[in-house]
C-alpha cells in the first residue's frame, strides 16, 4: 500500500510558519530563521537547531487547526518558502524599478510580505551588492566604450578581405581587396579605397557593429531612466 501524501500547506499555515520563524528563540538573541541559517559555533550546534525545529513543530501544531505537521516537514516547507518568495519579491522590485509604479502583473502576495519580513528585504541575496539606484547600464556603457576604442584601433590594422594574408590598413583610409582581370586574361589583385562603408566585410567588423548597436541601446535606456526619475521627482 502506497504511503498517503500529506495535504498541501494552506495559506494560513504558511503565514503561521512565517510568523513562528520570525519570533526570537530562547536566549540566543535572534529569530528562529536566523538561528537556522547561522553557522555552527560552540553554542549553536546541530542539536540546538534540531531542538529549535522541535519547538517550531510544537508551536505550529498547537496554533493550527489543520493537519498536524512534523518538524522535518516544516523545515522543508520553510526552505521552499524562502526560495520561492524571495524570487517573487525580486521580480516585483525589478518591475517596480522599470515601470515606476504599479499596477503590473505581480505575483507578490501577503505571503510574500510575511516571508520577506522574516528573511529581510535589504540583504545582498535579495538586493545584490549595490542599491537599486545604481544602474549597471552606465558601468556597462563605460566598459563598452573602452572596448570599442581598443577594437577600432585593432580592426583598422588587421581588417582586410584576404583570408591568407593580412595587409595593414591605416586609420585615415580604409582599403578593400578588389580582384581585376588584365588584358591577357590573367587575374591580378589590387587594393583600392573603399567607396562606401561595409558592416560585414569580416568577423571583426561584424563584432564592432554589434557592439556599436549595443552601446546605442544602453544610451537610449539611460535616457529613458533619467526621464523616469525626472518625472518621479516632479510628482
Image (spheres, grey):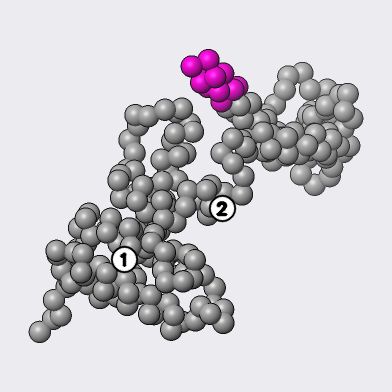
> Is residue 110 toward the left or the right of residue 130 in the image?
left
Question: What percent of the width, then of the height, locates residue 117?
Answer: 41, 51
Residue drawn at point x = 19 percent, y = 64 percent:
64
Quadrant of the frame with the N terminus: bottom left
Question: What percent of the width, then of the height, locates residue 235?
Answer: 48, 16
Q: Residue furthest left?
A: 1
Residue drawn at point x = 30 percent, y = 62 percent:
17
Q: Nearer the viewer, residue 46 or 193?
A: 46
Hey, which quadrant is residue 161 in on the image? top right
Tag 1, which secondary structure? Answer: helix
Q: Which residues are magenta?
A: 223-235
Hey, which quadrant is residue 181 in on the image? top right
Give the answer, above or below, for where 214 lies relative to 64: above
Q: Nearer the viewer, residue 3 or 121?
A: 121
Tag 2, which secondary structure? Answer: helix
- Circle 1 Cα neighbour tier, 10 Å, few/some/many (<14 / 14–19 / ≥20): some
Residue drawn at point x = 21 percent, y = 64 percent:
63
Question: What percent of the width, then of the height, locates residue 121?
Answer: 47, 48
User: Separation of disc 1 and disc 2 at Cα?
Assistant: 23 Å
Residue drawn at point x = 45 percent, y = 46 percent:
90
Q: Nearer the viewer, residue 227 or 58?
A: 58
Most common secondary structure along the magenta stretch = helix
Which residue is identified by label 2?
A: 124
Which residue is identified by label 1?
A: 77
Q: Residue furthest front?
A: 27
Residue 161 seen by the camera:
no
Amino acid at each position: 500500500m502506497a504511503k498517503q501524501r500529506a495535504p498541501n500547506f494552506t495559506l494560513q499555515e504558511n503565514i503561521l510558519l512565517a510568523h513562528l520563524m520570525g519570533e526570537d528563540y530562547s536566549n540566543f538573541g535572534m529569530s528562529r530563521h536566523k538561528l537556522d541559517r547561522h553557522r555552527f559555533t560552540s553554542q549553536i550546534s546541530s542539536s540546538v537547531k534540531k531542538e529549535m525545529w522541535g519547538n517550531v513543530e510544537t508551536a505550529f501544531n498547537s496554533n493550527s487547526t489543520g493537519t498536524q505537521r512534523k518538524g522535518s516537514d516544516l523545515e522543508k516547507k520553510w526552505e521552499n518558502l524562502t526560495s520561492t518568495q524571495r524570487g517573487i519579491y525580486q521580480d516585483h522590485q525589478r518591475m517596480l524599478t522599470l515601470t515606476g509604479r504599479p499596477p503590473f502583473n505581480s505575483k507578490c502576495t501577503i505571503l510574500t510580505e510575511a516571508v520577506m519580513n522574516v528573511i529581510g528585504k535589504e540583504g545582498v541575496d535579495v538586493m545584490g551588492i549595490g542599491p537599486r539606484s545604481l544602474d549597471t547600464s552606465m558601468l556597462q556603457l563605460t566598459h563598452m566604450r573602452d572596448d570599442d576604442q581598443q577594437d577600432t584601433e585593432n580592426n583598422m590594422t588587421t581588417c582586410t578581405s584576404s583570408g591568407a594574408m593580412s595587409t595593414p590598413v591605416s586609420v585615415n583610409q580604409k582599403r578593400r581587396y578588389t580582384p581585376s582581370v588584365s588584358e591577357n586574361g590573367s587575374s591580378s589583385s589590387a587594393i583600392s579605397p573603399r567607396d562606401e562603408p561595409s558592416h560585414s566585410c569580416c568577423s571583426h567588423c561584424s563584432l564592432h557593429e554589434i557592439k556599436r548597436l549595443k552601446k546605442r541601446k544602453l544610451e537610449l535606456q539611460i535616457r529613458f531612466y533619467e526621464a523616469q526619475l525626472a518625472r518621479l521627482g516632479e510628482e
